[in-house]
Amino acid sequence: MLLDTASLYFRAFFGVPDTRAADGTPVNAVRGLLEFIATLVSQYQPTHLVCCWDNSWRPTWRVELIDSYKSARVGSEADGVAVEVVPDDLQPQIPIILDVLAALGIAVIGADDHEADDVIGTLSTMATGPVAIVTGDRDLFQLVDDARNVRVLYTTRGVAQHDRVDDAWILAKYGVHAAQYADFATLRGDASDGLPGVRGIGEKTAATLLQTYGDLAGIQSAAQDPATALSPSVRSKILAGADYLEVAPTVVGVARTLPLSLVGTETPSTPHDPAVLQALTQRYDLGSPVERVVAAITR
């Protein structure tokens, strides 16, 4: 089970009522994330459990290819590095999350200048057994692989009411297969991520093009061939978007070959450091959610 950790703690922060420890420290995101982990581990009992981490939420190599990438989320710059806008009451909770996960013995894995998506892509490729990717980010649909039993537990309706996304689910919703999803997302774009897409090509047209020509390379080849049945309007849009289409697949596609390892990612059967866990639990009033996680992992 690979957790898109930031996706989950942001969801917890905005979904769990404001809760504070005795010293006034906000802890709603910490408590919510732990509750999510307890629910998921209890339901699926994964052999391995990884909290995948954004070592870089806006990797330089993606920004160099498309400078608008996630630009709407930039709040400031520190030493020339863009700083993501994070709510004031969430920021101090992130170190607490890391401390609690370490005390529990739940693996946290990131990669320099890469996002959690890239860690997930690599670890899901390395895994030999069934893989469940937990996220609210539809970009990770590109990793769904029925043949390898890789699915996404999509939390847009909530962790407790997540959708189990397989190829049939993606096909029914978008009209494309999972293997085509990255090309679909490239064509469509995503304003929230600063990805413009091909101007004038929306979801329906993107899906129709992929149904007809298979992949982005096939679409571009058809656009360059005057004998194909592409309408003049669509042909001109694809040709006009050539510069964007040259770089966007690299930005949209998640990395799958990072030098990572699954060693040490087994779901813990007992807390790694009970004394530290107890101290954190008492300091931040985390009793109930910590108890639920411990109960889930010690079944």
Image (cartoon, rainbow, N blue to C red):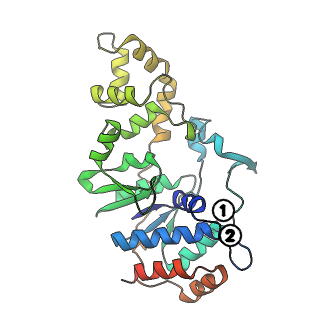
Left or right: residue 198 versus residue 286 is left
**What label does residue 35 carry, if any?**
none
**Callout 1 touching callout 2 (CB < 8 Å):** yes
Question: In the visual, does 64 lie left or right of 167?
Answer: right
Could you tell me residue 144's position as x and y percent? Answer: 33, 50
Q: Is residue 46 visible?
A: no
Tag 2 secondary structure: loop
Q: Nearer the viewer, residue 185 or 260?
A: 185
Determine whether 279 is above or below 216 in the image. Answer: below
Residue 261 x %, y %: 42, 65
Q: What residue is shown with label 1?
A: 90
Badge 2: residue crowd in 10 Å (few <14, some 14–19, many ≥20): many
Q: Position of residue 147 (x, y in %)?
A: 23, 52
Indicate the amino acid at tag 1: Leu
Q: Amino acid at mark 2?
A: Pro
Q: Which residue is mark 2?
A: 26
Q: CA distance from mark 1 to mark 2?
A: 7 Å
Give percent across and percent down for residue 224.
37, 15
Q: Is residue 229 above or below residue 32?
A: above
Question: Measured along the vertical axis of the image, is residue 69 above or below residue 124?
Answer: above
Residue occupying the point 29% across, 14% down: 228
Residue at x 31% of width, y 37% of height: 176
Q: Tell which of 81 and 97 is nearer to you.
A: 97
In the rendered view, would you say 27 is above or below 232? below
Q: Quadrant of residue 269?
A: bottom left
